Image (cartoon, coloured by chain):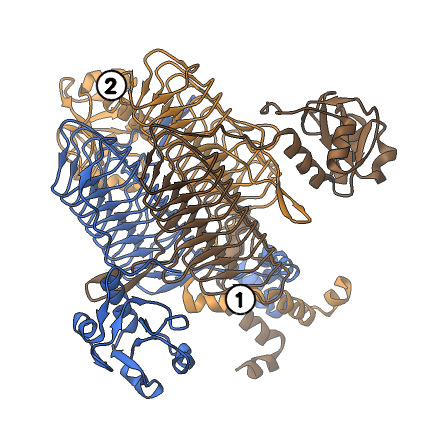
Chain colours: A orange, B blue, C brown
Amino acid sequence: MSIRARRSFLLAELANALGLEFRGNPALRLDGIAGIATATEQQLSFLQDSKYLPLLAQTRAGALILRKEHAQDYSGAALWSNNPYLSFAQAMQLFYPPEQPSPGISPRAEIAADVELGAQTRVEDFVQIGAGARIGDGAWLEAGVVIGAGVEIGAGSHLYPGVKVLAGSILGPDCIIHANAVIGADGFGFAQGAGGYEKIPQIGRVVLGARVEIGANTCIDRGALGDTVIGDGVKIDNLVQIGHNVEIGADTVIAGQTGVAGSTRIGRGCRIGGQVGFAGHIEIADGTVIAGQSAITHDIRQAGIYSGVIPAQEVRRWRRTVAQLHRLDGILRRLRGAADPASHSSSS
Amino acid sequence: MSIRARRSFLLAELANALGLEFRGNPALRLDGIAGIATATEQQLSFLQDSKYLPLLAQTRAGALILRKEHAQDYSGAALWSNNPYLSFAQAMQLFYPPEQPSPGISPRAEIAADVELGAQTRVEDFVQIGAGARIGDGAWLEAGVVIGAGVEIGAGSHLYPGVKVLAGSILGPDCIIHANAVIGADGFGFAQGAGGYEKIPQIGRVVLGARVEIGANTCIDRGALGDTVIGDGVKIDNLVQIGHNVEIGADTVIAGQTGVAGSTRIGRGCRIGGQVGFAGHIEIADGTVIAGQSAITHDIRQAGIYSGVIPAQEVRRWRRTVAQLHRLDGILRRLRGAADPASHSSSS
Amino acid sequence: MSIRARRSFLLAELANALGLEFRGNPALRLDGIAGIATATEQQLSFLQDSKYLPLLAQTRAGALILRKEHAQDYSGAALWSNNPYLSFAQAMQLFYPPEQPSPGISPRAEIAADVELGAQTRVEDFVQIGAGARIGDGAWLEAGVVIGAGVEIGAGSHLYPGVKVLAGSILGPDCIIHANAVIGADGFGFAQGAGGYEKIPQIGRVVLGARVEIGANTCIDRGALGDTVIGDGVKIDNLVQIGHNVEIGADTVIAGQTGVAGSTRIGRGCRIGGQVGFAGHIEIADGTVIAGQSAITHDIRQAGIYSGVIPAQEVRRWRRTVAQLHRLDGILRRLRGAADPASHSSSS
């Protein structure tokens, strides 16, 4: 079951709003969106991947967004799109626009005297806002959010419950920060001294651009000296770790549980899978794509697709693989020697 | 040091409660449980693994749960069990039953007017409950919990401090959600448009069955269109990421820091190690066992044990292994050519 | 941009405070610290790595901390140090000392009647402190912190917003716990019964030594029977998982997203990279160094550097590598047979 749509559309209205041609009864009313296998006669759906073509014969959806090249496979109401997935995203935004919170400041919030609160902001219960913070017009701080001293929250940004934004952090407009994320904790910086590690005070900031989305329980550390900078339109999933002084270029997306060590610079328009680990102090070219679970230990200077993921196997077979892998160096040296006696002397 | 037991038992009472035969003084009083090496004369312990048999001669424990086949190795008070570890778990539940909170609603909680609160619920300070939520009988919401609009919390469920359950999520009875976990944040869904990524509103729900346990700081994302569904009796450890529209079958256990990408379906009764990564849109058979740190990139159709973990080595040796691995394709092609000239022409 | 320094120093004062010899005008005033490339004439900087030697000719920094052996490459004001990075850390502590919170108890905190609050503590809004807890002198609990029953917080410890410390946990003096970390959640302990998994009550504690630092959203689980113990001076980064009954020796550092399964013992003075996974019930020698993303599945008895990380490659090349790896066992068996017929019979 899904959340009920906030709006409904006639087919012709929808086609107009999405800028698409259509086929079917212009007055057909659609009151929500669902997957192609479950949509009802009152719902819109879409077909992106041709592997689902057989579903065209079975779907009960009231109308479909699909490519015109599939017109012959389907006789129902249709919206023709060259990019059905994007049109679907846009239709979702029409049917399910972001909730507009009613403005107001909870008497159970604690706001320092000199905080600048923009127009139409919503500040919920148990929110604490520190001295000198500035909260932009229309920003929405849900329950239990904590905003440190001097923080700036851009207009229209939405902070879900429990988000912590620590002193000095800057968030651009229209950011979305999911529950319990932490923006601006200290970076992990210590110097080994005679009596143990000595803490290096972390005095940089976190600076997020416009339209940045940060996942639940994700951590973006403040810079050690300079800033940690996340570019416009960057989307970061849950449980991601971004170290101090990392820079991430605009419109890069990073999936869950990935970690980026300190001072690494990731370019614009990159797509990073989940559970990837980046070493510190490296640079990743604009437009790079990295498969989940990969280890990135060196600069990537040329955009491309990179992977280091090794799919699991049945355990007995895998154990033999690992045993061979762990002896690989010696085995290959010997084999090369046996296969080609010359290689032995030339390599030594 | 451990928490003090809430109850004490005579040996005969305990044997009766656990359904086990016993040997020893029925009136022996036991006032807690400890490990076999540290238990005192007033404490119960257990022996599961035969590698600890030598400890039988040394233990000071007042009584032991053990297999009858070990009777000859030990002369003290005993409870005979075919599964000492399970009997130990049950004994732990007897000595250390879950804390029964005193019911009551803190005046420092903020509860929407139309919330349905069951009998005997406990709602602590700084809890916020949104419109239309229903809180089952005996549920316990600790400090700083936030419950979104329309959420249902099953009877007897216990939410530790700082848990966030976002709008529309459904929790079955007797769930335990550990501190700062986030249930129902948006899934990670975007479509690439001309001006950057466009957000796909996430309109599905999270639905947890009965007796589900979710670890601290774990995230279970809401579905994109349909629901994310966690079956009865599923146990999920800390810092786990469950993506949108994932389905997890009953009685599956998942260890810490594992991530499951969107729309993947994990069967019933699976055991998943820590730091495992599952690709999206795959299916895992009932009863599958997966070793920690494995990458699961394809369907697993047949139950079994799967692994992809490569144990670390001393670094110089490992670097040689990786160097060979990275050149493996070329090396093996050449070697096969050298060892068997026919293979070269047949493969080209 | 960085946080403004809380103090300024004359060059001679600074040299004296750091115990370093210097060159230059003793009355030169320095009002902050920055990187060598960005520091201004009023700022201090440092040179640690000789790869940055070319920057000596360009820096505008008012003074530098550097090795005396680099004196000939640089003519400006200098503080001579054998360990410039450590001296830099110490200078940072002088310019940016930890914020001293003004003591006081928020009327919006909820504190049980029998809590012992030390002198000069600061307890902020929406903090809840349970029965029997003891809060040491000068401790600072930021907004939304929750302290369970019987917890002890050492003098001078600083808990950032949203930290949860569950019942019975013990924190030593001068600990720093970053936002939304969870100390003392239940360990992951279940026994398989006839009707699903049965929970094993987790009755041990978490015990942190002195000067422990714990990262944002990190989880340290309580022990099952005994305690989980983190030694003095241990530094743990964000999003780390420490399982029940783990013991970590003094002055060990652990980077982000690493996981340590239950009952594993890590020695003193170890350095552990990010995203490392430790199996349970193993022991790691004092002084061990482990590269990020490694899997540690067995005891490490001898200190050294260990790695299991495989750097990613361009994806087509990597796919061929994985294909060969997955067939490695069979290929090598055949090759060894071909290269040396004797090896085949001797290995069987």
Q: Is residue C344 left or right of residue C12?
A: left
Residue B152 visible from this viewpoint? no
Q: Amino acid at mark 1?
A: Asp
Disc 1: CA contacts within 10 A as few (<14), some (14-19) or many (>=20)? some
Q: Amino acid at mark 2?
A: Ala
Q: Quadrant of residue A1?
A: top left
Of residue A335 and residue C15, the one placed in the foreground of this image is C15
Q: Subunit of mark 2? A: A
Q: Is residue A332 left or right of residue C329?
A: right
Q: Which residue is mark 1?
A: C299
* Position in image of residue B333 (x %, y %): 59, 61
Relative to C127, say whether A345 is above or below. below
Checking the image for residue B20, the label placed there is none
Of residue C340 and residue B52, the one placed in the foreground of this image is B52
Relative to A150, say whether B154 is above or below. below
Disc 2: CA contacts within 10 A as few (<14), some (14-19) or many (>=20)? many
Relative to C180, say whether A313 is above or below. below
Residue sitting at x 38%, y 50%: C184
Secondary structure at badge 1 equals loop
* Position in image of residue A74 (x %, y %): 20, 33
Q: Is residue C13 left or right of residue C341?
A: right
**The residue positioned farthest toward the bottom in the image shown:** B72
Q: Which residue is mark 2?
A: A15
C-alpha separation, residue under disc 1 versus residue under disc 2: 64 Å
| Cβ atoms under marks 1 and 2 closer than 8 Å | no
